[in-house]
Amino acid sequence: MLKDKNVLLGVTGGIAVYKACDLASKLTQQGANVRVVMTESATKFVSPLTFQALSRNPVYIDTFDEKDPEKIAHIDVADWAEIAIIAPATANIIAKMAHGIADDMLSTILLATRANIYIAPAMNVHMYANKAVMNNMQILDSWGYHFIEPGEGYLACGYVGKGRLEEPTEIVRVINQHLKDSSLLSGKKVLISAGPTRETIDPVRYLTNRSSGKMGYALAEAAAASGADVTLVSGPVQLNTNHPNIKKIDIVTAEEMYNAMHKNFKNVDIVIKAAAVSDYRPKTVHKEKVKKQEENWTISLERTKDVLQSLGEIKDKQFLVGFAAETENVIENGIDKLKRKFLNAIVVNDVSKKGAGFDVDTNAVTYIRRDGSKQILPLAKKSEIAKALIQLISQDIRDE
């Protein structure tokens, strides 16, 4: 997957620089066009001449060392790169990237490039666990940067723990796999629903549920990263997405969700209904605030339209995936829903289990196909669950 790719290797100052030499060699062996950018600190550990020999290209260090008067070097390299790998990535460069600091050649290039950026941290175990470092990594992760987590073991500082730069072979494997995954849904149109809906009682009250939208948004990001053109129909959530391949439609009520899903359903290939749509709404919506009284207040409810079943009844070419949040007889209830609503597959989870319910960053699900076969995805970040689900869906589409 790396053959003929333009790869920028950013090398920052740490003892793990010696592994970056091996990484440069392996990237070149894979057929990649490699250009190395070193920070001044990195040159204290390994000579730029080493990377020049391994990459067969000049090494960039100084922002003001303009070798070609017709080009501005840091912009030229930024535009040239298709992939950028920062290995080793120190706490310092991670902080610069998270806060838009450009005070040397590498940080300036990283601000200007539109390449996919992979970050392989390497530092002392306590530095890696520091709240400031963790916060900076979370910022970059939310922006779509890809992290290759460090391994655990004996560190150069004498500590034993997490902080070792991942082995070059594994870094290359991860990037190859990501490049492969990025074309899984190339050319496909995907419709995803996410979040809760709200049903108005009066101007200050409404009925809703505990859905945060995190799973649906993670699926939208994963589908877009896999090359799909994504339409995301979202209930009211505290989330956003900046991915250029995601078109977001904001709705509030179950009726609005129904209309938006049906309007966009006809011309898509895959539909994933991850939203928690209200099953009921008040029969009467009060135009004025209902004042508190001494007696109890009974609100009469009526059923909303079943978005998922209505789509299942009219689907033709679409691969339709539903979600089932259960608290008992999880698999049995999921299979029943799969059949009743004419789905191709369903994702079920036990929301009563710790870490797998609403408004958390993790999930644990079972993916069930129409033929009854299952794939268990154990507790993991919702972003990882989403990637795994997109892989399963893309495989099932190819097998149909």
Image (spheres, grey):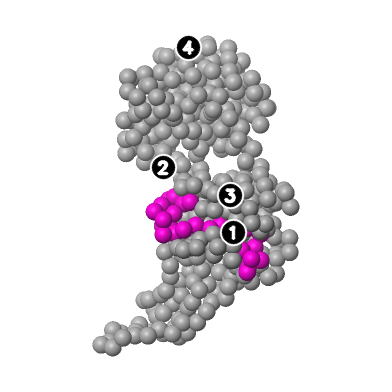
Identified at 56% across, 20% down, the residue is 24
Q: Are marks 4 and 1 in contact (CB under 8 Å)?
A: no
**Relative depth, front residue between 5 and 334:** 334
In this rendering, the label closer to the viewer, 2 or 3: 3
Magenta residues (range): 338-364
Q: CA distance from mark 1 to mark 2?
A: 30 Å
Q: How busy is the neighbourhood of tag 4: few (under 14 within 10 Å), some, or many (20 plus)?
A: few
Q: Which residue is mark 4?
A: 47
Query: Relative to residue 197, is residue 172 depicted above or below?
Result: above
Judging from the image, what secondary structure is the residue with disc 3 in?
strand
The image quadrant where one finds the N terminus is: top right
Q: Is residue 341 above or below residue 240?
A: below
Residue sitting nearer the eye, 35 or 152 = 152
Q: Is residue 359 magenta?
A: yes
Q: In this figure, which residue is indicated by the disc labeled 2? A: 138
What is the quadrant of residue 122 in the picture? top left
Percent x, y for residue 67?
56, 18
Mark 1 element type: strand
The amino acid sitting under disc 4 is: Ser
Residue 192 in the image, given as x and y percentages of width and height = 58, 59
Give the amino acid type for the residue marked by disc 1 in the picture.
Ile
Amino acid type of the residue tagged 2 in the rendering: Gln
Residue type, numbered disc 3: Gln
Q: Secondary structure at mark 4?
A: loop
For discs 4 and 2, the disc positioned in front in the rendered view: 2
Task: Indicate which disc, 4 or 1, sits on the residue closer to the N terminus.
Answer: 4
Q: Which residue is mark 3?
A: 375
Q: Point out the frontmost of discs 3 and 1.
A: 3
Q: Residue at x 44, y 30 (%)?
A: 150
Q: Which residue is mark 1?
A: 346
* Residue 182 percent location from the top left of the image: 62, 41
